[in-house]
Amino acid sequence: MPRFKPTALCVLLSSLFFNPCFAQNVAKTPETPPTREIAITLDDLPFVGSANHKESALKREHDRFMRILDTLVENQVPATGFVIAGSIEQGQWELLQAFHDAGFTIGNHTYSHLNLNHTSSESYIDNVAHADKILLPLMSHPRYFRYPYLAEGHGERKTEVQNYLANHDYIVAPVTIDTKDFKFNEQLYRVAYRARPKYLPQLKRRYLDYMWKQTLRAEKHAKGKPVKQILLLHANLLNSHFIGDIISMYREHGYRFITLSEALEKPATNNADATQEHAKAQAAAPSGV
């Protein structure tokens, strides 16, 4: 059997490994795609609508809120809830306490859900401060604020409110994916109570399809960068039915759920379209059943 001399062997190996044709045929190690991350935020806590202190309505809101909370806990999904302090009805402080005690974050959503585009900066700041005093026992640092309707105002009014929030250690929570869930929630309320079970499957399909389209739009806006998305939901009837489906959908598409604090470390650009849509006038959901 012929033997290669050491020198000849080195020359042969060198010619193989440094040959461009050979190099092209070597399989490249595939790069692991970056993990996509998303934070859930829930607006209008304790619950969208008004029970008007009716015992039966308060019981329904309690059960629906706890369905959302229990689903988040069972799936180990972090969330931040923004409270309209003036909407807390009898017995609903306990819901906020349960949310807080489960390890979730409470944020300020003003006292009466004012729209800064139609309110003076002085009145708006008073409204935020009023909510702050009520929610103080439940809030921790960092403290978060979200503008109702995502309306940040304009000109001097905008600047004055921004300065107040900064001086009082508030971090403004942006939105990158607006689900427009309030529209779907209104559709659900227009369906008679006894007819809802049959209506829910088609509503879920349309709602999740729209949410995913909004997600793809946000990812496209990020231009391929590994940004962290912030999802806007509301504490409402709709999401008491579908919060589990929302979690499953994102996980099936490779998303990891993170806290708002983590999302703000490298957030996607605030969705301007979402801001304009909300500022036009998000109608309050009917208080129905």
Image (tube, grey):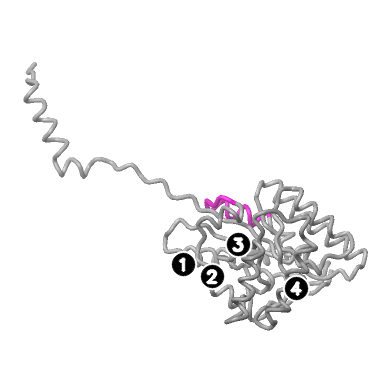
Let me know if residue 269 appears in the view: yes
Give how far across and how far down residue 140 sits, in percent.
Answer: 70, 53
Sequence-wise first label, 1 or 4: 4
For the residues bearing labels 4 and 2, Cβ distance under 8 angstroms: no
State the residue in front, 230 or 105: 105
Identity of the residue drawn at 83% across and 62% down: 61
Labelled disc at residue 231: 3
State whether residue 268 is above or below residue 147.
Answer: above
Amino acid on which the number 4 mark rests in the picture: Asn
Give the residue at mark 4: 127
Amino acid on which the number 3 mark rests in the picture: Leu
Give how far across and how far down residue 59 sits, in percent.
Answer: 88, 60
Per the image, label 1 sits on a secondary structure element best described as helix
Labelled disc at residue 271: 2
- Report which quarter residue 94 is drawn in: bottom right
Q: Is residue 199 left or right of residue 225?
A: right
Sequence-wise first label, 4 or 2: 4
Give how far across and how far down residue 238 sits, in percent.
Answer: 72, 64
Q: CA distance from mark 1 to mark 4?
A: 34 Å
Sequence-wise first label, 4 or 3: 4
Instruction: Tell me the quarter of the image containing the C terminus.
Output: bottom right
Q: CA distance from mark 3 to mark 2?
A: 11 Å
How crowded pointer 4 is (Cα within 10 Å; few <14, some 14-19, many 20+) is rated as: some
Give the residue at mark 1: 221
Amino acid on which the number 1 mark rests in the picture: His
Sequence-wise first label, 3 or 2: 3
Identity of the residue drawn at 85% across and 60% down: 92
Sequence-wise first label, 1 or 2: 1
Q: Could you tell me what secondary structure mostly forms the magenta stretch?
A: helix
